Image (spheres, grey):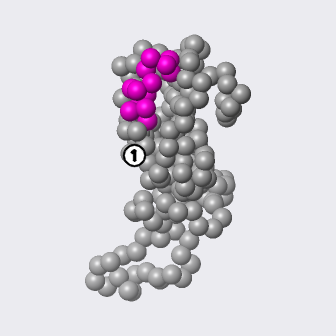
């Protein structure tokens, strides 16, 4: 299975796990990291520039990379704002000799569930990082490292906490 085959969302998403047997489990360990009750000056948002499907492996890899890069900063709060609801399926085909007698090609090609993904739109917030203003450069570098793990181009928005422009999730 290649991630590039599933990056662009096509058609209706399959999200009803009760109708699909064998849906893989969630591989994201935590959605919130750090100190949620701290006093923070800034909120950094990692925002998607395009619509896409992001597999849960990529979300987890980005979360781990951001957390690893920001860990030496004193106080922070990191939130993964997307949840992988969409069930991805794959119709595995045999490519060895004699395979034409074993499989049916595209007939009844439903596929087995292989992974979960989050569908994001342009402007969707992927990660939210709350920090103090003295750690701004380290936080921006950490979000850039995390963005490199994602299959969609992103931008970083910086908001002062308490502004009227402050986004609520």
Secondary structure that dominates the magenta span: helix
Residue in the image at 38% along x and 22% along y: 71
Q: Which quadrant of the rendered structure holds the N terminus? A: bottom left
Residue 54 on image: x %, y % = 50, 52
Residue in the image at 39% along x and 26% along y: 138
**Between 148 and 106, which is closer to the camera in this rendering?**
148
Residue 84 on image: x %, y % = 56, 47
**Between 7 and 1, which is closer to the camera in this rendering?**
7
Residue matched to label 1: 149
Is residue 25 something that shows in the picture? no
Q: How many marks?
A: 1
Q: Which quadrant of the rendered structure holds the C terminus? A: top right
Describe residue 165's horizontal placement relative to residue 86 as left or right.
right
Q: Quadrant of residue 158?
A: top right
Q: Can you name the residue that lies furthest to the left here?
A: 97
Q: Quadrant of residue 64?
A: top left
Q: Is residue 108 above or below residue 119?
A: below
**Between 127 and 3, which is closer to the camera in this rendering?**
127
Residue 9 on image: x %, y % = 57, 62
Tag 1's secondary structure?
A: loop
Residue 137 lies in the magenta-colored region:
yes
Q: Can you name the residue that lies furthest to the right here?
A: 164
Residue in the image at 43% along x and 70% along y: 92
Magenta-highlighted residues: 131-143
Residue in the image at 54% along x and 51% along y: 49
Disc 1: CA contacts within 10 A as few (<14), some (14-19) or many (>=20)? some
Q: Is residue 137 above or below residue 95?
A: above
Describe residue 148's horizontal placement relative to residue 20 as left or right.
left
Is residue 59 something that shows in the picture? yes
């Amino acid at each position: 299975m290649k991630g590039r085959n599933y990056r662009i969302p096509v058609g209706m998403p399959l999200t009803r796990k009760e109708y699909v047997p064998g849906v893989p489990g969630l591989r994201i360990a935590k959605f919130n990291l750090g100190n949620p009750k701290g006093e923070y000056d800034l909120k950094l948002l990692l925002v998607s520039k395009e619509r896409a499907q992001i597999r849960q492996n990529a979300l987890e890899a980005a979360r781990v990379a951001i957390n690893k890069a920001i860990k030496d900063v004193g106080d922070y709060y990191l939130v993964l704002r997307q949840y992988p609801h969409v069930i991805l399926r794959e119709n595995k085909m045999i490519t060895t000799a004699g395979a034409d007698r074993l499989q049916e090609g595209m007939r009844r090609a439903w596929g087995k569930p292989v992974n979960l993904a989050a569908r994001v739109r342009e402007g969707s917030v992927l990660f939210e990082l709350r920090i103090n203003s003295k750690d701004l450069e380290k936080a921006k570098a950490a979000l850039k490292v995390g963005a490199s793990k994602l299959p969609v181009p992103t931008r970083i928005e910086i908001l002062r906490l308490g502004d009227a422009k402050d986004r609520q999730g």
